[in-house]
Amino acid sequence: MSSDVRHTTMLGRRSFLARAAGVALVGAFGAACSAPESRGTLRFYEQKQEVIAYFDKLLRAFEAEHPGLSVVHDSTSSIAPQFVRNDPADVGCFNANLELARYVERGQLSDLSHLPSAATIRPDIGKLAEQYATFPGRTSVLPYSLAAAGVIYNRKIFADHRLPVPTTWTEFVDVCTELKRAGVVPVYATGRTTWTIWQGLFDYSVGSLVDTAEFFRTMKELGTDVGPDSEVSFQKTFAVAMERAKTISTFFNADQAVRSYEDGNLAFGKGQAAMYLQGPWAIGQIALVDPKLDIGTFALPVSENPNDRKARVNVDLGLYIPQRSADVPAAAELVEFLMRPDVINAYNQDNLAYATTKTAPPQRDPRLAGLQTYVDRGAFYQGAGTFIPTSIPLGNYLQAAIGSGDFDTMLRQLDADWRRLARRGATT
């Protein structure tokens, strides 16, 4: 943790300004009285198990700056029971996805547009959180942390075989072919853990060829009319992308179907493959195997135009305040604390992610340098798999397609499933 965060408990100009901002927020949210000596308890929900200890330290720092106000850290696995019981946490910190979208579109989250920190969010990143759902006139979620994913590669293997980082589809296939000829596994895959193949193979193959947000917006409009002759469909729009995916799968390790995510991190950490279609969450696990392994990242090229390359991103964490929070003004103070530059920037640097604000510094970890330029210029997309409801077993379909080489059947099945869900009004 950065020294800025460690010293937030010191009384000084920063603490004074933070409290002053808190008072202003209370006014903005309609509070009419000053804070009592004991202000009560906030519940803070955060979904990422690997950063529980990190956020615990932040919450204790917040308490030190806000005497009389305590925060309970809730890290249960799902937000649904909270909303079903009409008892959501006062502040949520959750992945912007279809699950959170349910509560956005139902108007169950407060409008955060008037918070000072809302004006600091990069507009292009703010739009990412709105691609799943919006509520008229509201900013329901403030993107907190952006994860950018691409191809993780072993620099030593590339150097030993005098291979360049590919910038076009043909170059990528040539690199894979040369590695396979040399007896090196070009791409390590972990088909037993289904999310890894839709996050990697499926999303990466689609993202630089298809505008995923626009595709799924149109798919929702079409609903039950989706099919081979509709304006867009999985069969038609994803056809070229899945041809790419089919080719990539021929360069996988032979035992990919029985290998798990943990197996992949271990194997790649031991230098048993040249490339790995994974995100920054895997880098820390790889480092546990070999902290000195020299790795880099690049965006998968799937066209012959290098300018088409984009990074797969997701709003790994977004902040929200449910309308049913017991203390919305105090919840807003916590959001403003977490959005403070010294806090949000330190979190993202320490956790191999990218900050979402306009003035944030670049990610300094050299292992992620290959994706920095894409984040800087907004050359990114949210994975197609993240727009597909969990009731459609995309991962299982991919397992079958990789095994048989028949990706066309998978695309037809996806269209059929989409029509089925559309009849039930369940495509979100």
Image (cartoon, grey):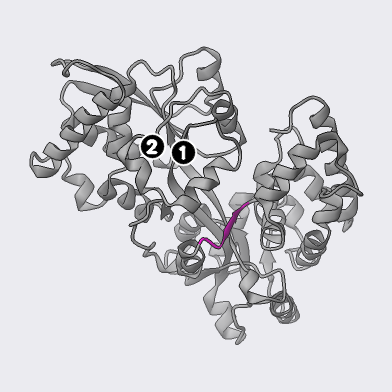
Is 380 part of what is drawn in magenta?
Answer: yes
Left-right relation of 63 to 305 = left
| In the foreground, 174 or 307 | 307
Figure check: 210 above or below 28 = below
| In the foreground, 123 or 346 | 123
Left-right relation of 408 to 129 = right
Name which residue type carries label 2.
Answer: Ile
Query: Which corner quadrant holds the C terminus?
Result: top right
Q: Position of residue 118 (x, y in %)?
A: 37, 41
Q: Position of residue 289 (x, y in %)?
A: 48, 60
Magenta-colored span: 378-382
Q: Position of residue 97 (x, y in %)?
A: 58, 38
Disc marking residue 52 = 2
Residue 381 shows in this picture: yes
Instruction: State whether the magenta stretch is mostly helix, strand or loop.
Output: strand
Residue 32, quarter of picture: top left
Q: Residue at x 52, y 57 (%)?
A: 148
